[in-house]
Amino acid sequence: MKVALFIPCYVDQFYPQVGMATVRLLEYFGVEHEFPAAQTCCGQPMANSGCMPEAKPLAEKFVEVFDGYDYIVAPSGSCVSMVRNHYAAFFDETAKRENTVRSRTLELSEFLVNVLQVKRIEGQFPHQVGIHQSCHGLRELRLAASSEVMTERPGMMTGLLNGLNGISFSKLQREDECCGFGGTFAVAEEAVSCMMGEDRIQDHLESGTAVLTAGDMSCLMHLDGIIRRQKHDIKVMHFAEILAEAMVRN
C-alpha cells in the first residue's frame, strides 16, 4: 500500500505536533508512508473566498504531487472535502487521473476505520472529552451522523476514541453545531464568528469538558483562541494527539 501524508498549511505552520501524531498512528499500524515535500495548499482558502480561478492552479499542483499513490491521508476533514468534493469544479468526469487522486484522498479517521479496519486502539486517556464535529467532516464527508439527517451512522472519530481506557464523553446540548470559524468567514464576519464560537464553548463548559477535540485544527484553532482569551480551563487537542498520547500510556 503506497500512502502519502498530506499536511494542511495551518497544521504545518502552527500545529506540527498534529502531523507528528498522525505519523505515529500510521507507524503504529505498520503503514509505510511518504511525505511529498513538493505539496502546497489545497486551495481551500481561495475557494472559500470565491476566488476559484486562483484556486485551480493549486488543485492541479495537488494532483501532480499526489498522483500514483494508493491513498492520500490528511488529519483534516475540511481539506479532504475540498479535494474530494470541490475539485469537481476544476476537472470534469473525463479527467481520469485527477478524479482518481480525488477519490483516494481520505481523512485520517476514514483511513483508519474504512481502510485499515481498526476496531479498537489500546491506550489510556482518563479525561472527559468533548467532541466537536466540524461541518466539512460531518456534512460533506459524512464522518458521523448529523442531527438533520435521520440516518444511523456511527461516528468514526468517536469510535476510535471510545476504546481508550478511562475516557468519558461530554453530553452536549447541540452535538453538531458549527463553531463559527468557516475559514475566511471568521475574517469577514468576525463578530458573528466569535459569538458562534463562544456559544460552542459555553456548551462544553456546562457539560464539563476537560479536553476538547475534533478532526480539524482549523475549528480547534478558533475555539482555542476563545478559550485562552476567556481563560477557561479546557485543553484543546486534535483526536490524533489524544490517540498518540494514549498509546504511549498503555
Image: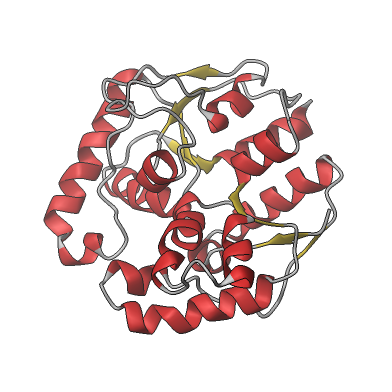
The answer to whether any part of residue 39 appears in the image is: no
Q: Position of residue 74 (x, y in %)?
A: 60, 55
Q: Position of residue 195 (x, y in %)?
A: 16, 45
Is 245 left, or right, of 228 in this rendering?
A: right
Q: Is residue 227 above or below residue 192?
A: above
Q: Residue at x 55, y 59 (%)?
A: 15
Q: Indicate the quadrant where residue 3 lies.
A: bottom right
Q: Residue at x 55, y 32 (%)?
A: 157
Q: Indicate the quadrant where residue 35 lies.
A: bottom right
Q: Position of residue 90 (x, y in %)?
A: 43, 74
Q: Residue at x 52, y 16 (%)?
A: 168
The answer to which of 50 and 246 lies nearer the viewer is 50
The answer to which of 230 and 71 lies nearer the viewer is 71
Q: Residue at x 54, y 26 (%)?
A: 158
Q: Is residue 149 above or below residue 69?
A: above
The answer to which of 42 and 19 lies nearer the viewer is 42
Q: How many marks?
A: 0
Q: Is residue 5 above or below residue 172?
A: below
The quadrant in which the C terminus is found is: top right
Q: Indicate the quadrant where residue 101 lies.
A: bottom right
Residue found farthest to the front: 94
Q: Position of residue 62 (x, y in %)?
A: 58, 74
Is 146 left, or right, of 169 in this rendering?
A: left
Is 178 left, or right, of 98 in this rendering?
A: left
The answer to whether any part of residue 173 appears in the image is: yes
